Amino acid sequence: MLTNRMDYLNRFLDCIDFVIAGKKGSISNDKWLVANYDPSFYSILSVQLKNTDTRVRTEIVLLLTALKERLAIDDIKSLRMNDNEKVSSACLAFFNEINETDDCIPDLIDELKHKRGQDFKRSAMRIKAIGRSQDVPTLRMIYGQTDNEMRAEIRDSLESIIDRDPELKKNKELLLSVPVFPDEKSFERFLETSTTYLDIRYRDSVCPLSEISLDKYNNIIHGIQKIRIRMFNEQENLKWYPPDMKGRYDELLDLVIWAVDDIKEKRVISRSNIPQVHDCKRCGSRMALSHDTWICSECGFKE
């Protein structure tokens, strides 16, 4: 069961009280704080890096070291430069840990490219814990070259790395989609069918309407999202295709932007006992209903 923000905050504040009362290690040695941490909880920790008690600041830095939390890098750089010797020493330990994990990453990626079986699984689990945002493009390439259990393992690693970066998390569904490798004929068919769908079918039958049914709305949103995912995965392939395909890609992109803007203006008529469409709590985009689950068409957030 996932820990909610309030539960984590309450536990953390209790641990702060214990440290202030003289119980050393109440924050840094709390296994629950490590096991139940989510990157979205970083602001809970970071605000206390300004706590007036040196012991609390030190313990939080040590906790962030155990978490290998890269979101803390800028804050801890500032602490190291401006705080006292005790806190500065903890900051140095944090950066030593980050640097050690960075040194391991090239070897882990090489193993993921060339190993199989248990060796691959071990490397995937390790990169899951220490992988950086800049490793995502390379890991996505490996993701596209594997299948079955190996693909599931590398997907799990990718998801953890993406969740640690608020900016990447906004495009989580796109980043977790399976990369498409260059195939000119397949891309040609995709451009033709997608352009026809938006520029003819949508423009003629949906654009003139001021209101649409919830079912139609969901079908359109899912259709547009499939197009967006394929376009995202074809970006790197454009250099392998004839020059005119880049122009057609850009035209389709303009159509997608137009259709998304247009459908946002429609009044959606819901079925009985099903709420109207609403916006994503994470990124503010419109959500669609799929199998009784609301899914954001932009970032993949579900509720």
Image (tube, grey):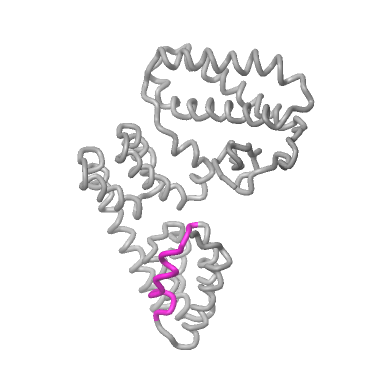
- The magenta-colored residue range is 25-39
Which residue ends up furthest to the right in the rendered image? Answer: 210
Determine whether, in the image, residue 135 is placed left or right of residue 298.
left
User: Residue visible at 60% across and 22% down?
Assistant: 254
Q: Is residue 22 above or below residue 189?
A: below
Residue 185 occupies quadrant: top left
User: Residue visible at 26% across and 53% down?
Assistant: 103
User: Residue visible at 52% across and 82% down?
Assistant: 17
Residue 140 occupies quadrant: top left
Q: Is residue 182 visible?
A: yes
Q: Is residue 173 above or below residue 204?
A: below
User: Residue visible at 66% across and 25% down?
Assistant: 259
Q: Is residue 59 above or below residue 212?
A: below
Where residue 211 appears, as percent x and y from the top left, is 78, 28
Is 247 magenta? The answer is no
Determine whether, in the image, residue 130 is placed left or right of residue 37.
left
Where residue 115 appears, as percent x and y from the top left, is 20, 41
Tally the numbered discs: 0
